[in-house]
Amino acid sequence: MATAYHMVHYRKVVQSGAVELGTTFESACRGALGEEDANKNALWNRVFDRVFTDPDGMQQQIILNRVADLTSAVFGEMCLVDTKSMQALLAQTPSTVALSQVTVAEIYDLHESEAPTGSQFVRGMAYWLAIGDHLFFVRTNSMSPRLMHKYFAWLVAGKPAAYPNGAEFALQAEFNKAAVPTNIGDIKAFRVKGGSAPQFVANVVEDETKEVSTTKKIADRFVAFSQALPIIRAILGEEKTESLVKSLGPQEYLSVDASVKVRGRRTEASKAKLRELTSSLDDLTDGTIQIEGRNGKISDGDAILRTSMPFALVAEGASLLDFNNVADQLQVVYSRFVQDGMIKP
C-alpha cells in the first residue's frame, strides 16, 4: 500500500475565558455531534449542518465530512473549500497558434474553470483526533490550526451537550518538558531554524536595572529579491543599490535581515502573546524549534510536541489519506506520547 509521511501536530485544549468549560474537549465534540434537530436526527447524520462559513474567509467554508465516535476518542476529517473559485486546467488537445509576428507554435489550451455543478475545490484538509483535552491532527495545504480553532469554536461553543454559553478555549502547544530538568517558566525567547520556514528570532530580555522589557527581534528572515530591493534602496540610495545589483553573480541574491524591538515593562498580555506565537511556530516549519524560558531551554526539534508518521494513501499517487489508517496512526501517537511521559492521559 502506498504511504506518505506527514507531521502529526499536538495541541492541548485549555480554558481561555472566565466561563469554565465543564467537560473535556472530546466529550464536547461528542455531545455537539449527538445533538438532535426537530426531526430527531443527530448532527452525525446531517452533513449540511456541519458546514461552517468563515465570515473572514474570503468565500471559504469548512466542512466536517467524515466523523466517527471511536468510543475512546472522536475522529474526523475537515475539508477547506472555496465556494466561488476557479482552477487552471491544461487541455491536452494540441493546437497551432501565432504567438508573435515571428512565432507560430503548437500548444495546449490553458484555461480556468469553476468546479463542476454540485462540487467544490478542496483547498486544504485536516484529519483530527480528540482524546480528553488532547488534540492531534494532520493538515494539508491551506488548512491551518487557526481555521480549525474557528470551526471547533463554532461546533461546540454554547451547545447544551458541549460547552456552556460564554465558554472560550485555546489550542495551546505543549512543550516537551522532559527535555529539561525543570519547568522552563515564562517564555523568554524562541527561534526557528531550517526546514521550510523563514528563520527568525524573538527574544524577551532583562535590562541592567532588572526591569523586564520585551524585545522581539526578527533576524535572518528570507525576503524575496523584489521585496528586499526597496529596503536596500532606502539604506544605500538608488545609485549604490543598482551598482550592487549589477555586481551580483548568477548564484547570488539579496536578502534583508530586519530587527524590530518593542520595549517596555512586561505585561500579562505580552506573555500571553509569546505563548500564542510559540504555538503558531509549529505550523511554519519542519525544522528545529528552540524555546527558552526563565528556568531553562528546550531545543533539538522537540520544543513542541509533534512527530512524523507514515500514513496510507487511498491510491498510488493520491494525496488523500486512508481514513481508517489515519485514525489508527493518531491513536498510536497518543499512546506513544503518554508512554514517554510527554502528556498525561
Image (cartoon, rainbow, N blue to C red):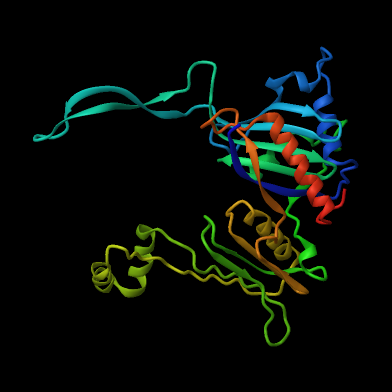
Q: Is residue 16 visible?
A: no
Residue at x 72% of width, y 32% of height: 76
Residue farthest to the top? Answer: 39
Query: In this rendering, is residue 13 above or below 218?
Result: above
Query: In this rendering, is residue 232 above or below 58?
Result: below
Query: In this rendering, is residue 295 above or below 224?
Result: below
Residue at x 67% of width, y 83% of height: 207
Q: Which quadrant holds residue 288?
A: bottom right
Q: Give the x, y percent position of residue 235.
A: 36, 73
Residue farthest to the right? Answer: 22
Q: Which quadrant holds residue 217?
A: bottom right
Query: In this rendering, is residue 282 above or below 3?
Result: below
**Residue 182 as seen in the image, left or right of residue 110:** right
Q: Can residue 131 be seen in this view?
A: yes
Foreground pick, 84 / 298 = 298
Foreground pick, 267 / 287 = 287
Residue farthest to the left? Answer: 102
Total count of labels:
0
Residue farthest to the bottom? Answer: 208
Q: Give the x, y percent position of residue 264.
A: 66, 74
Q: Give the x, y percent position of residue 98.
A: 15, 29
Residue at x 76% of width, y 60% of height: 176
Foreground pick, 301 / 12 = 301
Q: Give the x, y percent position of residue 72.
A: 86, 35
**Residue 226 as seen in the image, left or right of residue 267:** left
Foreground pick, 131 / 222 = 131
Can you say which quadrant of the picture contains the N terminus?
top right
